[in-house]
Image (cartoon, grey):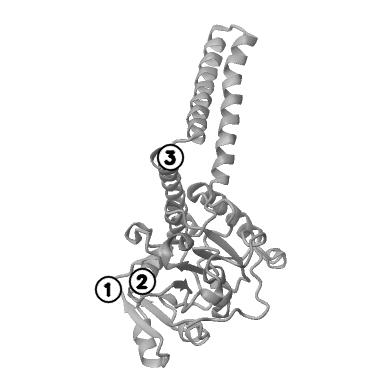
Amino acid sequence: MREKPAAGSDLAGPRLASDSLEGPRAESEAGRFRVAVVIPSYKVTRHVLGVIGRIGPEVEKIYVVDDCCPEHTGDMVEAQCGDSRVRVLRHPQNLGVGGAVKTGYTQALQDGMDVVVKVDGDGQMAPEFIPTLIKPLRLGLADYAKGNRFYNLEDVRSMPAARLFGNAVLSFMTKLSAGYWRIFDPTNGYTAIHRSALSLLPLDKVADRYFFETDLLFRLATVRALVLDVPMTATYGDETSGLKISRILPRFLFGHFVNFSKRIVYNYFLRDFSVASLELVLGLVLLIFSGVFGTWTWITNVESRVATTAGTVMLAALPAILGAQLLLSFLAADITSEPTTPLQALRE
């Protein structure tokens, strides 16, 4: 079942503006392209049937994952939904949005799907956007596509300053921890993944709850998957969020720190050892030496009431300058090392 691109759909984005639309898997050669949708369901009985009803014919299967919902969303869908594409999957206990999506991913792989799209059941993600979201994957331009609500300047102007600032901070933290320097809006859950990348991921190690999207990006980076942003318009309804910033912020910070540390070790000391690896090590050593030596000298001279000589100052300052330059050079190398070839082009 192959879908046709929506008329007038625009894929111009941070990673698509300079790319040709003639990918290694052109539409005329693609053959049958099987698309599935995963809908994690927890307290979405008011919206989920409407979401299912708006999913177009480009989708072959729809997995509604009842995440131990107290409203029994799965039972309601089975009783009231007549769409033959729908299959309800159930969790005996609540695993969070990530756990529900992973269950859908696993089933989609077993069913031989080419692409799996994640759509929330609360109505915030327009199902009509699916053809545009999956187009980079269908054309062989990417392994993972995600929405970016901050691409359109008119949409950005209407957003609260706190949301803009928070997303900028989260985006920078994700760039550091995952290494995808050209993407934005990392917590956007409207995503599509190709089986070439999905089949390589250790899904049991991906976070189950709110850190899921961010942790998935880190895991995609470890298999060198190509990720693209697709511009989209944000939709907000009357749903309420259970997300408490004060509760999840420490987990996010810790998660980003752990993923950043793993990425550096994996990419620069286990899989490879390059000039960038030396720049990182020497840069850190010089900065630490400068900080320790400078602090110790300053404290000693203050206690003994002795003026610090110009030579001592230079001995503390030069390693700091050199170390900073080496770390900036490492950062430049890290940015340019982002994947540029889709896994599906290498594996097919």
Residue under the image location 52 percent in, 46 percent down: 176
Where's residue 113, x and y in %? 40, 75
- Three-letter amino acid code of the residue under disc 3: Asp
Disc 1/disc 2 C-alpha distance (Å)? 22 Å
Tag 1 residue: 92
Q: Which mark is residue 272?
A: 3
Picture layout, residue 268 above or below residue 85: above
Q: Quadrant of residue 68?
A: bottom left
Disc 3 packing (10 Å; few <14; some 14–19; many ≥20):
few
- Count of all numbered marks drawn on residues in the image: 3
Residue under the image location 58 percent in, 7 percent down: 305
> Which mark sits nearer the N-terminus, 3 or 2?
2
> Which mark sits nearer the N-terminus, 1 or 3?
1
Q: The residue tagged with tag 1: helix, strand or loop?
A: loop
Q: The residue tagged with tag 2: helix, strand or loop?
A: helix
In contact (CB < 8 Å): disc 3 and disc 2: no
In contact (CB < 8 Å): disc 1 and disc 2: no
Disc 2 packing (10 Å; few <14; some 14–19; many ≥20):
some
Tag 2 residue: 109
